[in-house]
Amino acid sequence: MLHCALIVALAAPPAAGPSASGVPWGPLPGQPVPPAGDAKGQVSGDMSPETGAPEQVPKDSSAAPPGEAPAPTVAPMGPSGPAPVVVPPPEPGEATLELSGAGQGGQVIVTSPRGKLLGSYAVGPGQTILLRGAPGEYVVRSPSAPHGLVVPVVDRTHVQVGPTGLAVVRDEGPSPGPVVRIGRSAAARDGNWRRPVAPILSALVPGLGQMVNREYARGAGFLLGTLSLGAGALGLALTRDPSDAATPGVHGRTFAADVVGAAGLGLLTGGLHLLYMAQVMDAYAGAIGKRTPKPHTRHKVSLELRRMATVGMRAGDPAAQLYADWNVGVLGQVAPRFSVGLTDLGLKFGPGRAALQGGPRLQYRVLERGRVWLSLAAGAIVQGAFASGGPAAVPEGEKPPRTAAVAAIPYGQLDLRLFILDRWSIDIVPRISAPLGAARYYRGDGAIPKHAITLELGTGMGVYF
């Protein structure tokens, strides 16, 4: 839970003329009545000026001061009737909890999740009170109810107070009403620890951050899902046929099983990566109380971390192997939905060699639907492989082997992104590529021969600035 604390605040009557009713407030039932100097309706000194009690305005007098001409009468402009109530906009970083009365309205008490009293308000029929302060969780209840309604407030949340109880309703825009600003310093002291702690705990133990946020079923689901995928991937990686070495390479009867096993291992590990990253982001989303992200479509720069995986043939047994390529990328959005950048940056080491890679990419976003983006992209990876260690010994008269090779790997891909937070997403990327000029090297002894058309599946995450 993040930003989940409020300072005790007093509601002020609206300054919209004589017809505006006051906002009653007072201590909880059973608590001592405040002294007479702190009379009902007064405003505490730490509230902002716009929420204080309205100043006493002297009545207009038709008599002008001696020696001066009477002031001309200004005719009202526009239609007759009371002027609309102007609600001041929230300060940067403020959240709004809107309390409105339905039916006969009712009394409502607002506290922090730890039980700290923030205010007691009487909301009449059709009346609205706006509480503004730090984002976080609030507990809203009626005086007679033993338990309250936990309300996460990030931007704006509307709670309706009626004879049947409290209900969170869909917010349909700003409503006029008195504004009560809550001090931010005390709110920061009352529970802000969940915002950084929840994702850290989920990074250490999947699902633990959700449990800290009191989402126990959600946390248990993430934990069980992670354990299941991890156990499946580990079991598949350790599975070996002890008699497989009796038949060499692709001529063995187990070649198809090797391909299926390598592909299955790639899917399980890719799913494990996605689930792990998603549950860390989800823990933060739960801590701030925001489950419906608004993707940052107008970002300038995006960073990505991905693992591209494919199945390739190799000599010996098993005859097929999973090749994984971890890389990073940087893209700049130069026009709406259109991005260019340098991606697939990585360094690979193998026996007697090292490979450095990277290349340009053009990407266009063809679909934006809620938290889902779909993009088409094309690019090329330029990979240079260099021999490491001492030169190889060659017979007299023979040419020494090449110590460097350069390959170009053009590709086309789909890019599916699911946003967990406004600026964070998990990505699934199917890609078709083919090395030209030389083989494409992976870490260890993995390599794809030149001109071999390859289907890759990428999993990763993106962050947007």
Image: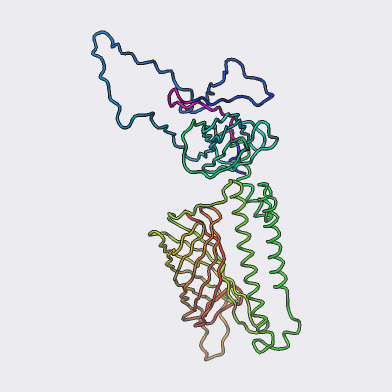
The percent position of residue 78, horizontal first and vertical second, equals 31, 32
Q: Quadrant of the N terminus?
A: top right
The percent position of residue 440, horizontal first and vertical second, equals 53, 77
**Mostly what secondary structure, the magenta segment?**
loop
Relative horizontal placement of residue 162, taking residue 214 as reference (left or right): left
The percent position of residue 388, horizontal first and vertical second, equals 56, 74
- Closest to the observer, 151 or 282: 151
Q: Quadrant of residue 206?
A: bottom right
Give the residue drawn at x 42%, y 33%: 86
Q: Is residue 228 above or below residue 78?
A: below
Q: Is residue 433 above or below residue 361?
A: below
Give the residue drawn at x 58%, y 76%: 352
Give the residue drawn at x 70%, y 73%: 236
- Closest to the observer, 240 or 90: 90
- Tell me where the magenta segment starts and ends, as one range: 6-20
Farthest residue toward the front? 103
Q: Is residue 30 above or below residue 208?
A: above
Q: Is residue 215 magenta?
A: no
Relative horizontal placement of residue 221, taking residue 376 as reference (left or right): right
Farthest residue toward the top? 66
